[in-house]
Image (cartoon, grey):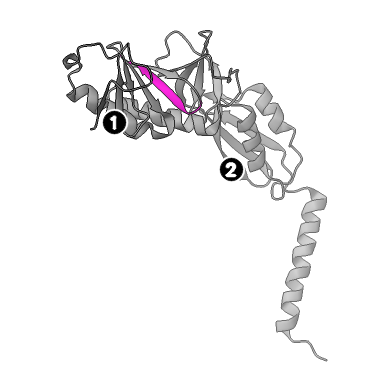
């Protein structure tokens, strides 16, 4: 049976690809011989470069260098993300970008740590840091250290709360974390406002409205507590227990 070129040509291509791969493998033409590393603030730390160099000799095509970059960002909290490029035939270029500090976390002991936008504790706070502060109460079990990560849901809710406080003009209040789900604000006027972290945008908006439009002097007794954790805002005086002294609907 006579084979036409339409039948032979695909077979020829397959054989050619196989031979090419074998030649590349034998000659190590696309073996990584150089990995350059830098960060957005300068050279990579020596231990990061050493980790990258441990992957020298791998295939430029068949090795997952993106996975290597992700492992480094997981182990090095101050490096948040990276960009990677390949230069044929044997070079990898990788650039890491620093994490962005977002807030300070104060332990009950008073120790202050800086947390980045991914939730990692990246360092102890400096005296000149101006990031907002969340003060952990005695009931919070998380005692951070460098490279540790705050639980993702809690971190996201803290970021949302800080963003809302800024939008509502309440950043001058002291932010106290009571539990993984509840927080309190110690306001400049001496009052304490309680709210749920997962409902921070709505409840803090109520607080802002109340502070701007309600005259607390109309009460005969001082109102030290504002509880926003319910469908209606509850104001408590010194003599009240869990019951409301007054209930105000927005």
Asked if the residues shown at circle 2 and circle 1 are in contact, with their CB atoms under 8 angstroms apart, the answer is no
The label on residue 205 is: 1
* Residue 223 position within the rendered picture, expressed as x and y whole percent measured from the top left: 27, 14
Q: CA distance from mark 2 to mark 1?
A: 46 Å
Q: Residues within 10 Å of mark 2 (few under 14, many from 20)?
A: few
Secondary structure beneath dot 2 equals strand
Q: Quadrant of the N terminus?
A: bottom right
The furthest residue to the bottom: 1
Res. 45 image quadrant:
top right
Q: Nearer the viewer, mark 2 or mark 1?
A: 1
- Position of 193 with respect to 22 (left or right) is left
Any part of residue 167 in sight? no
**What is the magenta segment's predominant secondary structure?**
strand
* Residue under the image location 64 percent in, 32 percent down: 72
Q: Which residues are magenta?
A: 180-187
Q: Is residue 30 visible?
A: yes
User: Which residue sits at x=60%, y=25%?
Assistant: 44
Q: Residue at x 74, y 82 (%)?
A: 7
Tell me: 92 left or right of 8: left
Tell me what residue is drawn at x 57 percent, y 29 percent.
38
Please give the residue where the numbered disc 2 appears in the rendered image: 85
Residue 111: in magenta span: no
In the rendered image, the vertical position of residue 145 relative to residue 51, given as above or below: above
Q: Position of residue 46 (x, y in %)?
A: 66, 22
Q: Nearer the viewer, residue 198 or 222?
A: 222
Describe residue 159's horizontal placement relative to residue 111 as left or right. left
With respect to residue 9, does 118 lie above or below?
A: above
Depth check, front residue: 244 or 25: 244
């Amino acid at each position: 049976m006579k084979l036409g070129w339409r039948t032979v040509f695909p077979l020829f291509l397959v054989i050619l690809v196989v031979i090419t791969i074998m030649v590349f493998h034998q000659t190590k033409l696309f073996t990584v011989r150089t990995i350059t590393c830098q960060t957005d603030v300068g050279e990579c730390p020596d231990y990061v470069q050493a980790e990258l160099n441990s992957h020298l000799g791998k295939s430029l095509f068949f090795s997952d260098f993106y996975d290597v970059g992700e492992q480094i960002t997981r182990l090095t909290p101050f490096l948040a993300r990276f960009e990677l490029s390949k230069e044929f035939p044997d070079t990898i270029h990788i650039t890491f970008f620093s994490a962005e500090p977002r807030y300070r976390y104060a332990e009950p002991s008073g120790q202050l740590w800086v947390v980045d936008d991914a939730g990692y504790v990246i360092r102890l706070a400096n005296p000149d840091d101006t990031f907002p502060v969340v003060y952990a109460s005695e009931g919070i079990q998380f005692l951070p250290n460098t490279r540790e990560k705050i639980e993702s849901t809690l971190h996201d809710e803290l970021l949302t709360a800080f963003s809302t406080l800024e939008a509502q003009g309440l950043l001058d209040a002291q932010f106290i974390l009571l539990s993984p789900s509840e927080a309190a604000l110690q306001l400049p006027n001496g009052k304490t406002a309680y709210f749920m972290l997962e409902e921070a945008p709505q409840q803090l908006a109520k607080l802002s409205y109340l502070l701007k439009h309600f005259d607390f002097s109309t009460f005969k007794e001082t109102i030290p507590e504002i509880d926003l954790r319910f469908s209606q805002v509850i104001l408590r005086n010194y003599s009240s227990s869990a019951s409301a002294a007054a209930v105000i609907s927005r």
